[in-house]
Every structure is written in C-alpha cells, then in structure tokens.
C-alpha cells in the first residue's frame, strides 16, 4: 500500500528507514489555514504535527472542510510544490477535486484527528516509496501563454502580434509570470514535472525578446537629443555637459511622437524580415530551437554595439527606466506583483493579498477572498439555512447561527424569551473571546512571536466549549495575557502607527471602528445586554494596529464580565416556527463587527436573504492601508483588521 | 585530531541546540527528533525551482555551512583545542562571518522567487549596521587583551570576565550576534509570517538539510564567539575546560533562542535606525570607557 504522492524508488531497507523517520517527523500545511483548524477545536500540534510555513517544507497537506472552487485550484498548486513523498489528509469534507484521492480522511474532531495521524504515519512508513509513482498534473497547472509588450507592461494580449502603442513585437510569456519572478506559494510555480518542456518554451521566448529590442536601427529617421543621465529634466539638442552636475550628456533618439519606444515602427522593413525569420524558425524541431538560442546571443551583442551609431554608448538608465513607474523616493525600479495567500502563514487562509512590490515597499495592493459566501443563496427549509450559514462562516459559526435564528424567529413573529436570550448572548460573548484569542494567535504567527501564538492557542481551545464557571476561572490567565502583552518589548514599536484609520467613517465596524473611537455596537440597543451591565468601551490610543490590539484585549475582559453576570452559554437552536411567513431584519454584533440579515420567510421556507457583514466593508480598506508601506508593516496592517474571508460577501 | 574534536563538539552542540529548540516550541523532549528530521529531509525530493541561478542556488547552503565552520575554527574551546590559533583570530571571526551576508544574498537571488529575493535584500540592507556592532565590541575586547589571538583574549579574562569588565560591549555584541544568526526576533530574511520562509522558502530535501544544519552551526559559532570574547572562554572551577566551554556556549545559544521565543519580530526600519543611531555611538562609548580603564586601572 503506497501513498498517492509516493516518491520514485525501490522499497529497500534504507528507504523503509527514511519512511519511518518521515512518519515520526510530520510537518503539515493546513488548507485553508491553522486558524480554521483552531476554530474547529483541532490542535494539530497536540496530534504530533508541526505546522510548516511553506509547501516546500510540508510533507502532509491537511484539508479542512469543503473548499470553494478557487481555493480548490490554489490547493492543487500548493500540492504540486510539495516535495515527494507527500500525503493528503482530509478532515470533515470531500477530497478536493483537483487533488489525488486522500490518503487518510476523517471527521472534524480532535480524537479522530489523533487516530487519523496514526494511520497517516503508518501509510508513510510503509508506502513513501514506489517503483512507479503517479504523475500529478491538474488542469490548473497547465501554463497559459500570453503576449506582452516589452516596453508597455500594461499591454497584454492572448494572441501574438504588435503592441498597439509602440508597434513592437509582443513577447510571449507564461500567464502570471510577471517580471520573471516565481510567484511564491499560490501561483503557477510548478515543480519538476513540467520543467522539460518549459525550458524549451523559454528559449523560444528569449528569442522573441531580442527581436523586440531593435532600437538602434531607427536613428536615421529620428531626431537625437542629449540628456543628463542623472537629471532627466536637462534636455538639449547639442552634445555637452550637464549644467547641474557636469556629467557628459547622453544622446537619446526621439521619434516624432517622443519616446525611444516608438522607434521600431520606423524601420518596418528590417523588422518584418526579422519577424519572418522568426516565423520560419517556429516550425523547427526541438534541437533547432537550442541552436537558435545561441544565435540569439550573438545577435543581441551585435545590437548593442555595432548598430548603435552615435546614440548612447551604453544602456542609459534614463532610457531604460523611462517608462517605469517611480517609487516614493523617485527611483524607478522593477515592480513585481506578488501574491500573498490564499494559504500564507501571516494572513488568514482563503484571503489573497496581491501586492505590487517595489523593492520591499508596497506600491499598491488589493485583497480578495477566495472563499467568500456568494450573495445568491438558494431557498430552503429554515433549519437547513441556519446550518448552512453557520457552516459557511468557519471563523464565527455561533454568531451567524444566532443571526439566522434571530432573523427567522422574528420573521415568524416569535419573541425571544429572556432565559434563552441570555444563554445565547453568553454563547456569543464566549465566541468573541475565542475569536479574539484566535486573532492574537494569528498575530503571533505573523510576527514569529512563538510564546503569544502558543499561549493564545491554548486559551482559545479552552474557551471554545467552556461553561460559565470554567470561563470565570480563566480570568487570571486572560488578565495575565493582557498585562504581558502591554509589557512585551518591541511589540508596541512594531504596531504603533501601522494601519491607522481615521475615526468616524461609516465603512468600518466592530473592534476596528471602536479602536478608532467610534461607538459602533449593536449590543447597546439590546435590553438583555443592558441587564447584564454592558457598556460600550472605545479605544483611546488611536485607530492603528496597536489600538486594535488593545481594543480586542479590552473586549476579551469585557465579554468575560458579561458572562460572569450572565448564565451558562447556550448554543442557539431554531425554535419551531411552523409554516409561518414574514419579512424581518436582524443584526448581531459578531466578533468582527455588526452583521445584518434581511430575510423573507414563506410557509416556513427561506426564500430570499440579504446578508451584510463587517468584513465585506473592511476588505476594501486594504488598498489604502498597504500603499506606500514597507512589506512587513503592510502585512501587519492587513492582519490587524482581522478579516475573515468567509464573511466577505461577493 | 584537534580538527575532529572541534567538529565533533560543533555537531554535538548543534544537536543539543536542536533538541532544546524543539522542546521549547513543542513542549516535548525528544533527543532523536533532530536526527529523524535530518533523515527525513534526506529522503525527500530536492526540487529545483524554475529558472534558478543554479550556481547561487547550490552554493548558498554549503557556503553558509563553510562560513560557520570557518568562524568556529579559530575559536579555542580549551587550551590547545583550537583548529588554528591565528595571530589575527579575533579579526578572522569577523571576516568569516561577513560571508553570511554573501550566502544569504545568493540564497535570495538563486531560486528566482520574490519572497526569497526580498529576504536577501533585507539582510543586505542591514549589513553594515550589524557588522559594525560585531567588530567594534571586538575592538574593545582586543584592547584589553592587547592581542588579537583568541587564546590571549581568553587568558586576559582569567581574573575578571569581559561581561563584567565591559558589559555594554557584551550587550551590543550579543544583540548583533543574534541579528547575524538571523534568529527571531531578527529573522528578517526568513520571516515565516511575512515572507513564508524568505531565503529558505525554495529549498527542499538534501539542500534544506544542509541549510538547516548551517543555521544551527552558525548559532553555535556565534555563541562560542560570545563565550570566548566575554564569558571567559574555558575558565571555570571544578569541571574540565572543554565542559565549561560547552556549557557556556549552550547557555548563550539557548538564551538567543529564548529571546526570540518571547519577542515579536523587530521592524526592519527600527532595527536599522537603532543600530546606526544608538548601537554605533554606544559601541564607540564602550571603546572609550575600556580605553580609559586600561589607562587608569593598572
């Protein structure tokens, strides 16, 4: 019995030994992310697995719950990046369609997980090597070729041809491979399986690329001007030296419409010739391509020296970087677009943050959710709707269960009785404590702050199912955590001033809004909460990442006060509503902020819903928070919003 | 013989450190864990990323290991137990460690990946800030010993360890050593939560095993350097000299690990400005104080 991701090799004694070593040294990559495992009460470290930061370092891919289509595809890429032997462990869901069949699958519970880990170890010890390994070649891994202009990065076409702006031949490249950088964990950074034919492709591209750089030929038809290499504003018609720095001015060829990039148009004949030659070569077989690659080199060298009559004697930086965007410091650098996520150790799983990096500064960024609930929901029985909503919101199931119950009961005309309402409120507050602790653990992961990660994780797992008495007994531990974080050196310096938001805008809710000083909380209007002694507390330290940390710590203690004044938390369950009809609108203060649900009930069936969540608004703040920041600060800023990609409604 | 003994000592310390590290992060003490981890890395595929710079990619882990061992080669573990007692030993430690930067730049550039590259450049950006804080405290140590011989430096501390004689130098050197070993909270080039492993993000299998080993040995080398320069080297009562070296080295190495355990990663910009604006003036002050003490105290 071998695992699907076995490595090629004859099962010998040495390999059995290695297999056993691997079985006892499991490192896993969790999809969607460790915070989802914790929200389900799964402790992978206790089951004997180490959580890896990258797929390169992982031997086991752990999939939790059902994945959305986009996340499923991203998972195939992650799997392809893992070195063999690699195993798949699926917990509480179907095996993702893009992966080979799971080696071990089981339900979502800690006991099942521990038992499954044992089986996985057995499978690895025995079947890590096989004589004939199965190939893994999911459709998402197939490269798509697109064509771009070497001078105008914004021109991207599906077909070969000329750039509409400058007329240069478009250069083929693999879709997603911008600036030639491999794109980290979530992009098409395929492994060895594809290496061979891609190498061939790339030779070919390089050839194209050189065709595109025929700038020197255009000089006869164009005007030459002289610029200073250091001061682009110094431009004159005669050679000479720069009045500012005294450097020799460098010749630059300008076409009628300005700009060196326009030139190849003016030398149509030669260019066409080159083009045909290229077409001809396309029909050749593999070996010829390699030869052509050689030829290309000569040709390239020729271009830069021989044909450069009177124009610049060297590659002028002014010319090369002329059309590149400028950083804040005025330097033109290569900007690369790098995806972070959807499975990234410093960000919530399912969130894809695409940052355009300029060095290690962020020029621009954008966040999207790969797992967000779609706005269109099929109709169905009231009970199934409650279950579906609670399951869909992996990081705050209790809050959304409560929201659904409240909305349906209201539509059915039922009044909440005070005892149930208290139990529900306490369950909501318990989830708030657990959720904020989960965020702290995530912060620990992001900042390599191991102590915080472990402490918060332990407390979160304890909180999840605790009753009132147990929660009250945790007060000293939670208070100690509070004090400890206030006193941790470097933490304030790390968070202060990062991700600052102005107060008083309508776009944000929950702890993010309250940290910025706006008194935004649904609980204020709730009579049950008033009886429990709820009072809103807003931050005084400002709406930055540090303020949000303090706000969440404060709310953990405040929620504990409410539970102490209340009753045992009781999971919301839908009361019998019969076959009533009605329309209602309910809202709940979830751990991440107000969520509102508008719902139409017809004869006990939910026919239309409209859900509005805090994270749908917060995700829009990301672009603003990351722009112009250093990479580390940008990630901290995004992390401090505590985005749950599940709660982003698309 | 000496070479074998020193290498054995390095490997044993690296193994002990790995055991303690795993103990701190998982709470379980498993002496075989590092060996199992090494064995399982060897049994896994060692993938090449697409379009790598082969030379840089292959050289980086080996270079890092060689650098760490070279640094250790001039550090005495006991009287006579040193591979090469160079006349410029103290300076050689610094020169060897300068190549840590080269190795990291190569590891950053080699795999042709954005995360790794940002990691490599981050380390480059900090280069002089770290290097000054390694070399300036060593200057003050050499001033007291009136020699760059590492054995003479240990001998100069027979009556009073440098950690007492020049505590400021010790603090600066310790912090810079931690930064040079790129351990948390100074793990800017690897930064799991920011760069998903950064410079080691693309290494797997055998190459990753070499890289991990190199990082452990680097910590041990820097801890040994701290021991030799500030903690009196092999000096100590009762136990044999090599045992004292081992105990002190491991204590320093573990305290480096612990610091990372209880602190969040430092901001890159903060580290740079603190090193330049605070660290270097303090290092100069340290040299001045030590100089005055040498003149005043006979």
Image: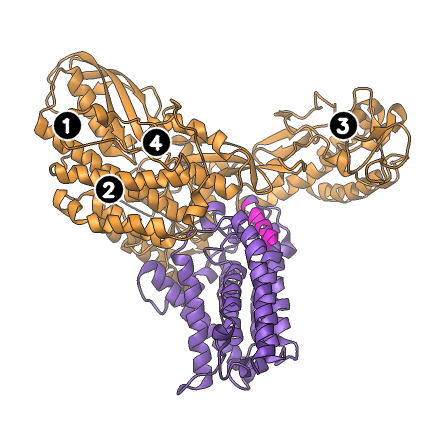
Category of crowding for the residue at label 3, using alpha-carbon neighbours closer than 10 angstroms: few (below 14), some (14–19), many (at least 20): many
Task: Name which residue lies at 62% across and 40% down.
Answer: A180
Q: Position of residue B73 (x, y in %)?
A: 58, 76
Q: Name the secondary structure under disc 4.
A: helix
Cα distance between the residues tagged 4 and 2: 26 Å
Residue A239 is a magenta residue: no
Q: Quadrant of the N terminus of chain B?
A: bottom right
Task: Please tell me the colour of chain B.
Answer: purple
Magenta residues, start to end? B115-126
Q: Are marks 4 and 2 in contact (CB under 8 Å)?
A: no
Q: Which chain, by letter, is orange?
A: A
Residue A394 appears in the picture as rendered: yes
Residue A557, labelled with which disc?
Answer: 2
Residue designated by label 4: A646
Quick check: A287 above or below A126? above
Q: Position of residue A354 (x, y in %)?
A: 50, 34
Task: Name which residue lies at 90% across and 33% down.
Answer: A239
């Amino acid at each position: 019995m071998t695992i699907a991701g076995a490595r090629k090799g004859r099962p010998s004694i040495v390999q059995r030994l290695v297999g056993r070593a691997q079985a006892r040294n499991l490192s896993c990559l969790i999809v969607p992310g460790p915070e989802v495992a914790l929200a389900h009460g799964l402790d992978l470290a206790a089951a004997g697995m180490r959580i890896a930061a990258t797929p390169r370092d992982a031997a086991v891919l752990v999939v939790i719950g059902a994945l959305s289509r986009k996340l499923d595809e991203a998972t195939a890429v992650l799997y392809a990046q893992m070195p063999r032997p690699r195993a798949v462990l699926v917990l509480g869901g179907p095996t993702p369609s893009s992966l080979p069949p799971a080696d071990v699958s089981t339900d979502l519970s800690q006991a099942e997980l521990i038992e499954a880990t044992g089986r996985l170890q057995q499978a690895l010890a025995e079947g890590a090597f096989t004589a004939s390994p199965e190939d893994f070649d999911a459709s998402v891994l197939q490269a798509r070729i697109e064509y771009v202009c070497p001078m105008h990065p914004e021109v991207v076409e599906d077909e070969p041809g000329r750039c509409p702006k400058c007329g240069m031949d478009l250069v083929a490249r693999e879709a997603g491979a911008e600036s030639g950088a491999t794109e980290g964990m979530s992009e098409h950074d395929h492994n060895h399986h594809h290496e061979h034919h891609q190498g061939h492709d790339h030779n070919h591209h390089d050839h194209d690329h050189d065709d595109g750089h025929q700038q020197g030929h255009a000089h006869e038809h164009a005007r030459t001007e002289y610029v200073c290499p250091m001061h682009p504003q110094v431009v004159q018609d005669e050679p000479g030296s720069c009045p500012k720095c005294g450097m020799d001015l460098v010749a630059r060829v300008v076409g009628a419409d300005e700009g060196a990039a326009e030139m190849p148009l003016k030398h149509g004949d030669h260019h066409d010739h080159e083009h045909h030659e290229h077409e001809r070569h396309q029909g050749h077989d593999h070996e010829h391509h390699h030869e052509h690659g050689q030829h290309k080199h000569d040709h390239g060298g020729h271009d830069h020296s021989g044909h450069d009559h009177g124009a610049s004697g060297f590659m002028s930086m002014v010319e090369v970087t002329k059309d590149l965007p400028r950083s804040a410091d005025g330097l033109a650098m290569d900007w690369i677009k790098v995806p972070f996520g959807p499975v990234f150790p410093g960000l919530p799983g399912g969130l894809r943050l695409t940052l355009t990096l300029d060095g290690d500064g962020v020029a621009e960024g954008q966040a999207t959710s790969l797992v967000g609930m779609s706005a269109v929901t099929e109709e169905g029985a009231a009970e199934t709707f409650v279950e579906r909503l609670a399951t869909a919101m992996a990081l705050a199931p209790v809050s959304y269960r409560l929201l659904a119950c409240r909305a349906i009961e209201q539509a059915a005309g039922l009044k909440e009785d005070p005892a149930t309402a208290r139990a529900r409120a306490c369950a909501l507050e318990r989830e708030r404590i657990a959720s904020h602790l989960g965020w702290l653990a995530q912060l620990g992961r992001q900042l390599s702050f191991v102590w915080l990660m472990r402490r918060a994780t332990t407390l979160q797992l304890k909180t999840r199912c605790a009753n009132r008495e147990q929660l009250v007994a945790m007060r000293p531990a939670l208070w100690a955590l509070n004090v400890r974080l206030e006193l941790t050196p470097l933490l304030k310096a790390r968070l202060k001033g990062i991700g600052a938001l102005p107060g008083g805008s309508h776009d944000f809710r929950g702890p993010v809004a309250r940290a910025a000083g706006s008194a935004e909380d649904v609980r204020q209007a709730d009579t049950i909460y008033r009886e429990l002694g709820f009072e809103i507390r807003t931050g005084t330290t400002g709406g930055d990442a540090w303020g949000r940390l303090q706000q969440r710590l404060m709310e953990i203690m405040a929620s504990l006060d409410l539970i102490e004044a209340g009753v045992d938390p009781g999971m919301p369950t839908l009361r019998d509503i019969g076959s009533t009809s009605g329309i209602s609108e309910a809202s709940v203060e979830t751990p991440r902020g107000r969520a509102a649900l508008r719902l139409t009930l017809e004869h006990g069936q939910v026919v239309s819903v409209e859900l509005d969540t805090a994270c749908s608004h917060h995700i829009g703040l990301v672009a603003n928070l990351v722009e112009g920041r250093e990479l580390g600060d940008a990630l901290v800023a995004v992390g401090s919003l505590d985005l749950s990609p599940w709660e982003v409604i698309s | 013989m000496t070479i074998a003994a020193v290498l054995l000592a390095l490997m044993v310390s690296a193994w002990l450190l790995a055991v303690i590290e795993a103990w701190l992060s998982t709470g379980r003490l498993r002496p075989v864990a590092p060996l199992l981890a090494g064995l399982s890395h060897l049994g896994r595929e060692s993938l090449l990323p697409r379009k790598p710079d082969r030379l840089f990619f292959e050289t980086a882990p080996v270079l890092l290991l060689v650098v760490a061992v070279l640094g250790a080669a001039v550090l005495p573990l006991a009287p006579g137990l040193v591979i090469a007692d160079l006349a410029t030993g103290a300076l050689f430690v610094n020169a060897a460690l300068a190549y840590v930067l080269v190795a990291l730049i190569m590891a950053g550039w080699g795999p042709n990946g954005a995360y790794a590259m940002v990691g490599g450049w981050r380390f480059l950006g900090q280069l002089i800030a770290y290097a000054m804080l390694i070399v300036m405290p060593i200057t003050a140590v050499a001033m007291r010993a009136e020699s760059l011989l590492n054995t003479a430096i240990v001998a100069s501390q027979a009556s009073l360890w440098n950690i007492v004689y020049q505590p400021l130098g010790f603090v600066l050197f310790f912090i810079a050593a931690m930064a040079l070993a790129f351990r948390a909270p100074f793990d800017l080039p690897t930064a799991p939560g920011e760069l998903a492993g950064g410079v080691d993000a693309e290494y797997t299998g055998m190459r990753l095993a070499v890289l991990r080993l190199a990082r452990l040995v680097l910590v041990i080398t820097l801890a040994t350097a701290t021991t030799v320069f500030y903690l009196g080297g092999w000096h100590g009562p009762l136990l044999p000299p090599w045992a004292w070296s081992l105990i002190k080295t491991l204590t320093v190495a573990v305290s480096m690990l612990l610091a990372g355990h209880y602190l969040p990663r430092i901001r890159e910009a903060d580290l740079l400005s603190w090193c330049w604006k605070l660290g270097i003036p303090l290092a100069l002050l340290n040299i001045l104080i030590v100089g005055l003490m040498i003149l005043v105290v006979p």
